[in-house]
Amino acid sequence: MSYARHLTESYGLPVFTFPGPGSEGPSPLPEAGSVAWRIVSDTYDAEETWTEAFARFTAAVDTTRVRAIVVGAWEEAYDSGPEDIIEALVAARAQLPALRALFLGDMESEECEISWINQGDVGPLLENFPELEEFGVRGGTGLALAPFTHRRLRSLTVETGGLPARVVRSIAAAGLPALEHLDLWLGTAEYGGDCALSDVEPVLQGDRLPSLRHLALRNSDIQDEIAAAMASAPVVARLETLDLSMGVLTDQGGAALLGGQPLTHLKKLDLHHNYLGDPLKQRFRDTLESAGVTLDLDRGHAEEDEWDDRVWRFVAVGE
């Protein structure tokens, strides 16, 4: 099992955690536009709420120059959603004219397991920040997003141990003419990942994503089905990076992918955390590395268990 990690970079900027109440932070603070500001409360026994930390942040920093905000842990995230946080960010939109990147839920397992994070409707963030270029969210429990249009967004990331199909369908139906990078952790049915291949079909067609160059559909129970569909998906021809990592990818899906349309135009094919056999991995190398494609075939922590006369395989990030 792998785990989601804290972001170290956002919008090309290093992530800096805004000091907590009473802590000795650097003096002076970094220049407002030089870092991505991680604002955090404590999941357990918080001294202040996230919105109180945000109020201290807006009083201490020239928010008109802030380009990236990373929302870290909030109090009792395992039991409470980010509605107050979303409301506070929307209320402050006039104070954040330069904001171009926003990530909601940057928590590691010690703070809150990814499938325990309570999320909410993130639509108001996309609606009220039309200049955003990068948006990401971690956690699928309670996550909601209606179909939307955003003309500036270049990167969209949704990291979950189980992504609800209704959210996948909304993203697939979204109007995102500038989107270059789409990264969806579809997850496992055990944690609410009820996505079917039909839900991502509009993404594979690519008609609504004319600028897409980097596609990740990963961490999925249905990785074989997705890989097989990629063999003839129209969107693949214009991609630079294809990422089908972290899921339950076996020789069945891998062989279908390799036997489909050419992949030699890709800069990178990422299949790490897989259940591929060594002969098929060698076929990938023979076919693609000679064409200059960077491959990641690392098995990682993908381990099979057998009980009740059945072989069990697991996604990289579930709970």
Image (spheres, grey):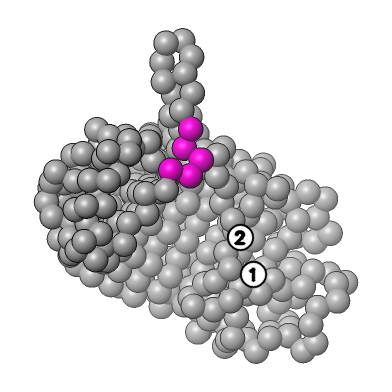
Residue 271 percent coordinates (x, y): 35, 49
Residue type at mark 1 is: Arg
Residue 189 percent coordinates (x, y): 43, 31
- Depth order, front residue of 259/5: 259
**Mark 2 neighbour class, 10 Å CA radius: few under 14, some 14 to 19, many 20 or more:** some
- Depth order, front residue of 316/17: 316
Residue 287 percent coordinates (x, y): 19, 53
Mark 2 or mark 1, whichever is nearer to me: 2
Is residue 182 found inside the magenta-colored segment of the image? Answer: no
**Which secondary structure lies at badge 2?**
loop
Q: CA distance from mark 2 to mark 1?
A: 10 Å
Q: Residue 22's image quarter?
A: bottom right
> Can the viewer see residue 112?
yes
Residue 6's label in the rendered image is 2
**Which secondary structure lies at badge 1?**
strand
Look at 18% across and 39% down and name the residue there: 256
The quarter in which the C terminus is drawn is top right
Residue 306 percent coordinates (x, y): 47, 18
